[in-house]
Amino acid sequence: MTEVPVARLTRRLSDTPVDFLSEGVVVPAVVSDVLLMAGGPALTDPSPFDADEPRWRRLVLVTCWLLADPALLACGPTALSTWLTSHDLVTLSLLVNPQQFVQDPDRREELARLTLRALALTPTGETTEQAADRLSTVDSIKRHEVLLAAKAAEERAAAVRKAMEEQRAREAAARYSQV
Amino acid sequence: MTTHTDYPVADYEPMAATALTDNERWPLLTPAAEGMLSRLRTHPAAPLYNHACGDRLTTTARDNLHAYREQLHQGFPPPDWVMPLVSRAYATVPRYRGHPVPRSLTEVPTTDRHDLLSHAESHVPDDADLTNLIVYRTSGSRGPAATVPMTPEFCALDLPVMQYILSTLGIPLQGGPTRVSLVNVYHQPVAYQFASVSTYLDGAGVVKVNLHPSSWRTPTDPVTFLDACAPELYTGNPISLAALADLPLTTRPTAVLSGAMALGSGLRNRLTTRFDCPVIDLYGITEAGLMAWRPDNGPHRLLPRRLHVEILSPAGTPCPPGERGELTVTSGENPLLPLLRYRTGDHAALSVIDGAPALIDLEGRDPVRYKSSEGRWVNSIELTHVLSPLGLAAWQLHQNETEAVTVEIHGEADPTAVESAVRTLLGEVPITVSHTNLARDAKPQRYSSTLAGALVV
């Protein structure tokens, strides 16, 4: 399995040109360029990248800049396209301001590691388990899921407590023996 | 009705705990059953009802209970349900979720009433339907009282179980809307009393009564009413059944079922002679329902329910057959409270008798009563009612031959408050309260007495 240094990718993210974060960029054109660089045909249907989701489109641009790393381009146009249109990237854009993937060291590492995992690449010097472990320390989606699960558990516990305190529950039902 | 302003049990305010309409109490109420209910409610000698309670059974629940009765007759089910229950609990019960799923039952940590008391909600599965949740408080005679969530169907399992027990003795439980099938008898200064009907028993009457004089309009009403009911069965505890035996009833039940406390052989003989019918000693806990029974003074026979019983040493290791230890139960029959290795606080040895599992030397709760300075006998459950709210972890209450009372308490409670609580029931008897260390695992017997007549045997 091809290994790629995470540090190289995070450095690349911190060097993201300002243009990639501006409003005026035509996202389908940038995606098309990346796919061409990866040896594929140009983007024929731009509609997926025209969606009215500004945060997501900005994250796609940042990711495109990252994918222009030669080791990532080598994964081919299909893998890159799949990652750019993945549900994870949509979720991530909802949880984190895309600018953070350029400015914040933890978020840079998160996008770098998520991209490596999506392209079936391994960070240099790490086993698959170590890579998964390190990703988990910066994984916004997982952290969000944990928070959601904790919130759901709290709500359920409150619902059970409330049901147990209801007068309807306390009227109960007839018992037939004594224990 | 006499009021008990000095008896701090707010729950017993007449009709204060009702919340449902009759249609909600009996979703399957038939006109014939309604007639029975009306007769019980309006009988001129009826007790001073202070509660209303139905069975809340749906068609599905009723059908499940009928199927359950059939299943009991097929004998002990194979234990192939145990590990699926463990897996389900580890997937859906907050207390277990997130922990590695054990490969065998003995790897599952034990729980107890303290656990249930502090976090009942963490024992209820995430996918359990809360719509028909009902609650019962445990008696608190062994450790602290806990609130137990259950379904109406689980609550009604007593009926097919009792029917099964009776059938093994050749006694039918007939039911039907022209008959009162069961009167559940209490004898306390205050207790819920209500008239009900059982959908499972085809509309038969069911009544819960308190034999205490304050619960009736006239002193002769208990006999008039109970003889008019002429129930198929009386259920109660040794103290209430002893009071029942003193009444000049002319009708006879087909069986008497005693629970909640140990039934002594003397009282059993007295009840058998008095009512001329089999007297059955039941053992169970609110959390798991009825678990074992005996028609005589021999071992308690385990019921062929989906109950897995273990006997554990104080260290938590399984005791070999025949060795006494703590009764520990695993059961998934209450969908709102699956129990995995739940320590009951009661002790026995497990053995096989006539090819079936039985509990030997089951140490139940002794039916102790206490004498007040006015000469009134006070049931230990009444003392539990006044001591439970004080937040004591444990206590031991003893009355000696001179009627002096000592209370040893474990916990932070103020001894003065403990003394005042006991005085509300026992009056001006000498009372000494002291702090002591009652080790949790020892499950000390809470109540004892060396005063003549204190033990109901």
Image (tube, rainbow, N blue to C red):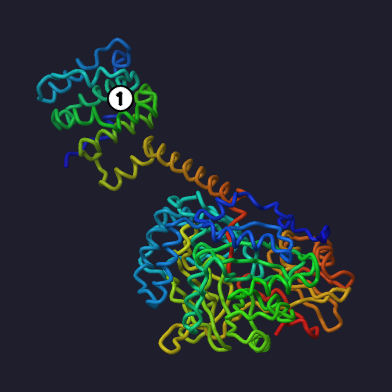
Residue B306 versus residue B349: which sits nearer the camera? B306
Q: Pick the residue in front: A142 or B289.
A: B289
Q: Secondary structure at mark 1?
A: helix
Q: Position of residue B336 (x, y in %)?
A: 49, 57
**What residue sits 57% from the left and 88% below the top?**
B296
Q: Residue at x 68, y 72 (%)?
A: B226
The answer to whether B251 appears left or right of B76 in the picture is: right
Q: Is residue B174 left or right of residue B143?
A: left
On-image quarter of the N terminus of chain B = bottom right
- Place of residue B170 in the rendered image (x, y in percent of width and height, measured from the top left): 48, 84
- What residue is drawn where x is 64% and y is 62%? B39
Circle 1: residue type: Leu
The residue indicated by pointer 1 is: A13
Query: Is residue B268 visible in this depiction of the protein?
Result: yes
Q: How many marks?
A: 1
At a point 63% along the width and 66% down the height, the residue shown is: B207
Residue that sits furthest to the top in the current view: A24
Q: Residue B294: horizontal and vertical position, in percent?
A: 54, 83
